[in-house]
Structures are given as structure tokens and as C-alpha cells.
Amino acid sequence: MDWTTEVEQEDRPQSDEPVAPRRSRFKAVTVTAVLVLVLAIGGAGFVLGHDVLKSPTPPSTSPQIANSHFPFGGSGGGTPIAVPPSGGSASSTGGAAAAKIAKSVDPGLVDINTSLSYQGATASGTGMILTSNGLVLTNNHVIDGATSITARDVATNTVYKVKVVGYDVRGDVALLQLQNASGLTAVSLGNSNAVTAGEKVVGIGNALGAGGTPSYAAGSVVALDQSVTASDNGSPTGAETLTGMIEVNAAIVPGDSGGPLVNSKSDVLAMDTAGSSSGGGFGFDQGSSTLTRAYAIPIDTALSIVKSIESGKSSSSVHVGATAFLGIEAGSNPSAQPGYAGGSQSQVSGAEVVATIPGTPAARSALVPGDVITSLNGKSVATVSALGEIVQGLHPGDSVQVGYLTQNGTQATLTLQLASGPPQ
């Protein structure tokens, strides 16, 4: 298909309602930007959260606290935002050629909708069908913290229950299985190693979580092998660095995460993952609708992670199967921070229990808010991230020994049996 001048590098207009949406072998000048993973927004600047996140009622059992995190399934971060009315649609840009390309790709896509019951919220994103029996590729951040997931097949409008096969938190890739699916249309996969700067592309997805016919936006490849830093409300470090990204000037918006970035032949070159806007530095600025850049994970990189997941072997970065769940909301221990004014837990490193989730192993134990977890199965826990990494290597049903410091400064231990929880 010839790419005509009808494909304009213009931006997809955003709704007035505040909403929000990661290698290649090419060598290029590496840049660093602060952005959000095509997700929930909180004012200017990107924050890691969930695509088109909405929270109709404040969560009562797991309050969202600054710098808090659910390292055992669930995210303490994310800012509630509005979602377009049911049946609404986002505008599409790029001309007749881009529209034709998008139409040919649409049958291989699904809208992913998640429930985050521990946060009292729901979220939406996009997925690409890899096999006729319903293996679907998406971003990990689209399903992070989800207690239930469904997917709507764009081609047939059929809604499927979804099982998480596995995910890579650092690579921001997740593999899903649509339950009892057959005869689905798969996307056509391209070669991301052949991508060149200046190449015309179209980004497609469930923009703004509107559902219906996917929206699309045309643009071109700006640079290869880019590094970006994503602000992460759910991380004690406050940021996550992503490398090997393809940078484009297509208007990737909230809800597009997990969707395809395709070439003029409708072949998938990469997975839409992140974007930034002008008018307020990097990140979505509610006062600006001009998107200046977006980033996508090369499809070859994503598929290498898919292959690792399909092998059934977990690693330091890849998690396969159900996620172990302790059932606490944890935050960095403030008493271990410089300038803390003493107390029985002064200068103790660890993960502070901010809240326990009702019905979980932690809630049925002696752990209470204010306790600081210092070890798990004999492994030292100095940070929330360290605790999360240890738990990620465990499985539901495993018994773990928790070492902690009580609010009174007493060292204590207890044994818990891990439950099954949402993906990290």
C-alpha cells in the first residue's frame, strides 16, 4: 500500500474529561524523558498507574497513601480519573490511508477491562491477539493489580473472561489467555529490527477507554533505542527506567497501552506503551492536547518475553502463573528516613505495613499498621521493592516466615500461608 500525503502527523484530540494512557538493536543517541505509561494521570507529568483508571468511590479498606505500594498484587498508586460515557469514541487522525490500515488491523485487537477491587476502581487498555485460541499480548501495567479481567473481541464484540499466563514487570509485557476462545483473528507481526527512522506508522488502540471501533493516529518513527524514565506512584523509588524503545510522533493517548504500532503493510512493529505532551514538560498536561512524542516496545522484544513466559519457567523478571499474595499495603518506613525524630523504630530499614487487606492472610495474622517487615523466609527486607521481589518468586500456598518489628520496638516472627492475588 502506498503511503500518501493524506497521512498527517497531527494529534488526536483529547476529551475535556481528564483521562490518561516500553528493544531494538539499532544504535542511536539515547535520551531520557519523564513520562507515563499510557495510563492514569495526576496533573501534569506522567505517573505509572492503570489505563483510563476510574474510581467511583474511595476505597475504604485499602486507603491510597503517598509512596505506598501493594507489592503482593495491587497498586497503591494511581489517580482516579473520569472515563468517557459508555459508547463514546475518541477522534482518529491520519487520513484515508491510515484509516484503511487501522480497519485491517482492528479484527486482531481486544479491549481489556479490569477490576481493581482492592482500590475500588476499574481500568481499561488494549490487547493484540497472537493466536486463534486467544493468546493476547498487552502491557503489564494494563493488568497490574487487577482482581478480575475481561476482554472484548473487537471483531465479534464477544466478551471473554481472561486468565493471566504470565508477565514481566521490568519489561512491561503480559501474556493473557481468553477463556474458551477459538477462531479468533490474530494480528500480523512484523520485524522490529528492520524499523528505520522516518518510517510511517499508525498507532491503534482503545483510546480513552471508549470501546467500540478502535481509534488510530498516524505519525512516523522519530528515533530508535531510546531510554525513558516513567514516574511511578506505586514505587518507593518513584521512577522506572525503560530502554530500547521506539520513539514516534503519533498521538498515543490513554487507553492505547498494549495496542499495536503498525507499518503501511499493517504489520505490527511495536506495542504502544507511553507518551508525553507539550505545554507542561513531559507528561500529559490537562491544559494541552498537543502530544509531542510516544514510545513503543519493539515487537521482537515483546515476543521474546512471551516465549519465556510460554516456557513456563519463572525468572528474576518473568513471573509465570498465579501471583502469591500476602495481603498488605506497604510503604517505606518513615523512621528510617534522614531527619526522622526518633521512636522505637528509628533507623530501621524495611517495609512498613500501612494497611492489611480484609480476608487475606495478613489480616488474619498479628500484623497491624505501623509494624515494619524486616525479613521474609530469612531474606533481609530493606525496602518495599525488596519485599515485592521476594514474594514474586513465591507461589500461592507457600508458607513464609515473616520477621517484623512491632510499633513497640519488639522483634517478632510469624508464619503465613500465601494466598492467590492479582498480578503485580
Image (spheres, rainbow, N blue to C red):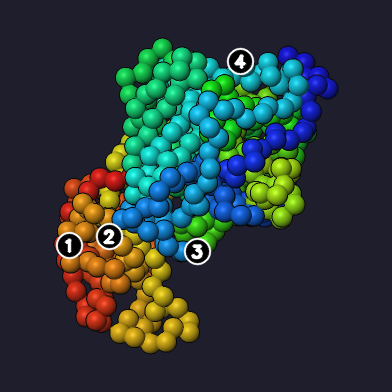
How far apart are the alpha carbons under marks 1 and 2? 9 Å
Q: Are marks 1 and 2 in contact (CB under 8 Å)?
A: yes
In this figure, which residue is indicated by the disc labeled 4? 104
Mark 4 or mark 2: name the one nearer the start of the chain: 4
How far apart are the alpha carbons under marks 3 and 4? 42 Å
In this figure, which residue is indicated by the disc labeled 3? 237
Q: Position of residue 28 (x, y in %)?
A: 72, 46
Nearer to us of marks 2 and 3 is 2
Task: Evaluate whether residue 421 shows in this view.
Answer: yes
Which numbered dot is residue 365?
A: 1
Nearer to us of marks 1 and 3 is 1
Q: Residues within 10 Å of mark 3 (few under 14, many from 20)?
A: some
How far apart are the alpha carbons under marks 2 and 3? 22 Å
Q: Position of residue 360 (x, y in %)?
A: 22, 53
In this figure, which residue is indicated by the disc labeled 2? 356
Mark 3 or mark 4: name the one nearer the start of the chain: 4
Mark 4 or mark 1: name the one nearer the start of the chain: 4
Using the image, determine if residue 413 lies above or below residue 314: below
